[in-house]
Amino acid sequence: MEAAHAHNGHGHGAHGHHYSGLMRWITTTNHKDIGTLYLFFALTMFFVGGLLALMLRAELFEPGLQFWRPEFFNQLTTMHGLIMVFGAIMPAFVGFANWQVPMMIGAPDMAFARMNNWSFWLLPVGAILLVASFFVPGGATAAGWTIYAPLSTQMGPGMDLAIFALHIMGASSIMGSINIITTILNMRAPGMALMKMPLFVWTWLITAYLLIAVMPVLAGAVTMVLTDRHFGTNFFNAAGGGDPVLFQHVFWFFGHPEVYIMILPGFGIVSQIVPTFARKPLFGYSSMVYATASIAILSFIVWAHHMFTVGMPAVAQLFFMYATMLIAVPTGVKVFNWIATMWKGSLTFETPMLFACGFIFVFSMGGFTGLVLAITPVDIQLQDTYYVVAHFHYVLVAGSLFALFGGTYYWLPKWIGRMYDETLGKWHFWLSMIFFNITFFPMHFTGLAGLPRRVPDYNMQFADFNMISTIGAFGFGLAQLIFVYVLVKAIRGAGEKVSDKVWEGADGLEWTLPSPPPYHTFETPPLVK
Amino acid sequence: MVSQQSQTNQQTLVKLLLVAVLMFGFGFAMVPFYRALCDALGLNSVVKPDAVANTQVDAGRLLTVEFDTNLRSDLPWTFTAVEKSVRIHPGALTQVTFEIRNRSDRPVTGQAIPSFGPQLAGRYFKKLDCFCFTQQTLAPGEARRMPVVFVVEPGLPQDVNTVTLSYTFFEVEGKNGKDG
């Protein structure tokens, strides 16, 4: 007991006496508090990014320019992407890791509690820099979330703010990842062998390694942009012997692992939910682990499929095409394992399971369009069209976001000790699912017909489909208010009290704790058999 | 036991930080690696002399080569092609002249980057000599006439009758004491 206490080191001092009110949250080193902070931060940024998306869709409701100047439209697309990726999806998954990883492996807290506090509180700073960049001369960066040179080497001070925001958020991610890896490697309860870890922990372990490997590369890329802008270097400046295409290589070396960073923990969450509601153990546990690891390793050798049109040799195009298609194998293993887990299970469809099934269904569709785009000649035709937009929203919204929703409904009763409103949860799922498809399914058609992305105006022929997309987008946005209502209602204690196990079929250390779990848990490590 | 846990954690922290620092370095290491790879694969060779394999002149075919000159807006030069266009036979060695003048009162260094219309013509357009192979530095008010020697290979697809060679001069910042 004493031992478990003290090894929190300096972190322990902070919870000797509790601050109350705001100071509690600013100074907290408790993994549950920090998890909560991450999740609320992510939710806030989700609505900021969502608002930007609705501003985009409003402009695209009809052809012609209605609301925004084209420059501002480009700022909206850019900031929507940056905020959703770095402000909403990634912090949300880190929030889940903070709450769940220590509880799932039987650790008392994260390995470096003080650093954990730091890695969270850097995020609002980065977010403020990003949002503030709308108000500097020239506005926010409009180079797209990929901030390709030479656009990004030319823009106004908004670009500099975005670069600093990326530096800060990258530092936050790296610290968070170091914490997660150290916790998982060194602080598992006795008997919790690596191959006994819940899959959510496995996926986060692998994701954290990806983050440590690629966030520094992004930091390097944006640093090069910064020195090109202000200090006379010529990394990407063709006139000085640099090459803008080099930026794309460096960026996507980060960018492709990054897209798996945003989906692997989602796989982990779904792999926790499906067995619970199928009341069967996960089918093919070890193959799930190996599939996750293969996806992570393959993610380092496929980056150039984002840039088939830069004029690379045919042999390179073929390599990146086949390597990309190879990823379908481990991903397929995962999808089939989930389905096999459901096979002959006694299934019930509570909200978390609905989101998990929705995830499997819609994510697979996004996976298939990804395979279509992996084919070089097809990609050359479709690059920078709405087909690509449809593809990555199918994997990111219906993939990562639905997994996050599912995870929230799954673990929220554990976190707060009370059940959420199941009826409203189901409404949230079905409305999200329907409006998501109304928004993004037509984009496949407009993309195939050649509608370019990131343009505020379009030809009359695309008017109907764009109108449908916009209606869907507003419906999707409104459906998310149900989620907020469900959260508020549950947190204020409206639901009935739940048992420790919450879900009949749930399995894992976190379900052995009371609901809600006490502030400090597993100070004496549990014994895992 | 107690300090052992935190010591193990510290060791893991140091190792992982090292990985992060190495990967930061790796990002920068991609720059020379990319250049070496492009050289090895013959990519990005627009500002290097080309080797001409076949100088057989196709006298039966006439081709218009147009010249276009551009300045990135912040470069205080004038840049003109002495010949606006030439009519040539594919395979024939041709020389044309361009002129640059520095309109400012400071020395300025520029680098020209060629591009071709239609794009595929670039593959058949071989430059033996070009001012774009080096950076050009002009003293205040200085003017310079510069040759371009080229061959358009006869393999150029038959449906291409006009090739536009477009040069854009970019200022090389950080030279001549002007900060970036």
Image: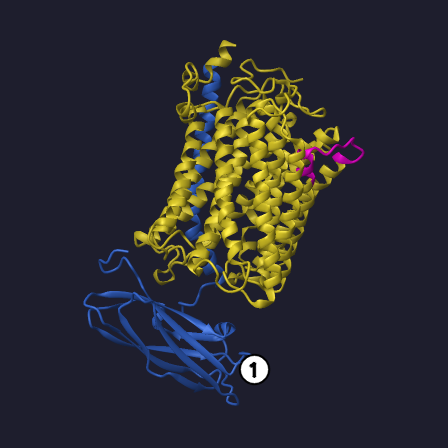
Chain colours: A yellow, B blue
Residue A406, relative to residue B69: is it above or below? above
Report the residue at 43% width, 20% height from top: A11
Q: Is residue A346 magenta?
A: yes
- Identity of the amino acid at label 1? Gln
- The quarter in which the C terminus of chain A is drawn is top right
Give A341 or B43, whichever is nearer the viewer: A341
Q: Quadrant of residue A382?
A: bottom right
Viewed as shown, does residue A97 lie left or right of A348? left
Q: Which residue is mark 1?
A: B158
Task: Give residue A250's position: percent from left, percent from top.
Answer: 46, 50
Viewed as shown, does residue A198 lie left or right of B175? right
Asked whether residue A415 appears in the rendered view, the answer is yes
Report the residue at 44% width, 40% height from top: A170
Give A328 or A85, whichever is nearer the viewer: A85
Residue A6, relative to residue A217: is it above or below? above
Viewed as shown, does residue A440 lie left or right of B59? right
Q: Tag 1, which secondary structure?
A: loop
Q: Which residues are magenta?
A: A341-357
Q: Is residue A284 magenta?
A: no
Task: Give residue B139's position: percent from left, percent from top.
Answer: 21, 69
Asked whether residue A296 appears in the rendered view, the answer is no
Crowdedness of circle 1 by 10 Å Cα count: few (<14), some, many (20+)? few
Give A256 or A15, whichever is nearer the viewer: A15
Residue ranking furthest to the top: A2
Task: Give residue A70's position: percent from left, percent from top.
Answer: 44, 60
Check the residue under mark 1 and report the chain it is in: B
Residue ranking furthest to the right: A344
Report the residue at 29% width, 59% height from top: B173
Give A141 or A488, whichever is nearer the viewer: A488
Residue A237, relative to residue A291: is it above or below? below
Number of marks drawn: 1
